[in-house]
Amino acid sequence: MTQIGTLGPAGTYSHRAASRLDDDIRFYDGVPEIADAVERGDVDRGVVPVENSIEGSVNATLDVLVEYDLYVVGEVVVDVEHAILAQDEGFEVVASHPQALAQCRGYLREKYPDAELRSVSSTAAGVEEAREDDDVAAIAHPSLADDTVGALDESVQDADGNSTRFVVLAREPTDGGDKASIVVYPGADRPGLLYDILGVFKERGVNLTRIESRPSKRELGDYVFHIDFEGGETEEILCALDEHTDWVEFLGSYDRVG
């Protein structure tokens, strides 16, 4: 049995994603804590959110991909349906994960303009607060409704087709897969730098599925690039990128799970 670390408590979207890998799941409060647990060997795999179709990338995950010596060995995509859960309509606070609050900001502004929005560690943590305090409502999956909190309204996200992509972290890479992820640090800025990097993929007919910049944390205006791409000759691409950049970090080649 494979032990999985993910964001808790039970009932989070991370929990739903992790359950596609195994039932032996250990919960943590944050993405860095999950990465720590995988790196130490406390769990075999970590499942962390990396990208949402409405709100974009999860920066905490992008940062641990650079800061920890871990590999991406799979991805899981989970459809997201948010409901507003409360003991009754008399709440004054809406608690949920910051990404969930952001995915429902239009709905909340229209329906509950005076409610205080409170960020908590997960959607399920918001439901726990709502169960303990009738002044609090939660944004979470409707399946978390029970005898204490009911779903006052469902499908409250601002856009249809809301989904979150999770990546599976491990200490060792897999042999290969349909997609690969890398991090590129260009080093000194110069005209045509991004053109040269993208040209490596164009020349080989390799399709990029995602590219995003994150601060390198060295100085203002200095960035690393997170790049996902389909198949292709990974080793050849890494060697070609070395000619144009300061360093390239291979994060893994992997398939979708479940």
Image (tube, helix red, strand yellow):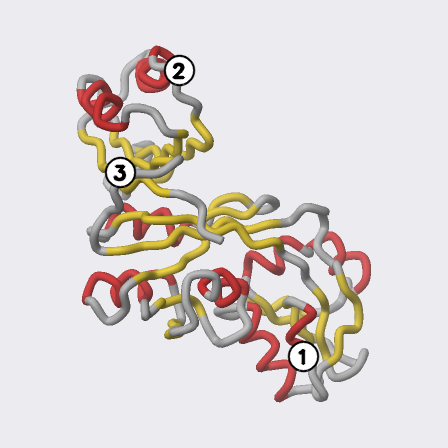
Looking at the image, residue 123 sits to the left or right of residue 180; the answer is: right
Q: Residue at x 23, y 40 (%)?
A: 218
Q: Residue 7 appears at what percent x and percent y?
A: 43, 67
- CA gap, disc 1 and disc 3: 41 Å
The mark that comes first in sequence, 1 or 2, is: 1
Residue closest to the eye, 155 or 18: 18
The mark that comes first in sequence, 2 or 3, is: 2
* Residue type, numbered disc 3: Glu
Q: Is residue 163 above or below residue 83?
A: above
Residue corresponding to mark 2: 205
In this rendering, the label closer to the viewer, 2 or 3: 2
Q: Is residue 201 above or below residue 212?
A: above
Residue corresponding to mark 1: 136
Q: Which mark is residue 219?
A: 3
* Residue type, numbered disc 1: Val
Q: Residue 50 appears at what percent x and percent y?
A: 44, 49
Residue closest to the eye, 168 or 54: 168
Q: Secondary structure at mark 2?
A: loop
Q: Is residue 212 above or below residue 95?
A: above
Q: In the orientation shown, which residue stands out farthest toward the front? A: 1
The mark that comes first in sequence, 1 or 3, is: 1
Q: Quadrant of residue 123?
A: bottom right
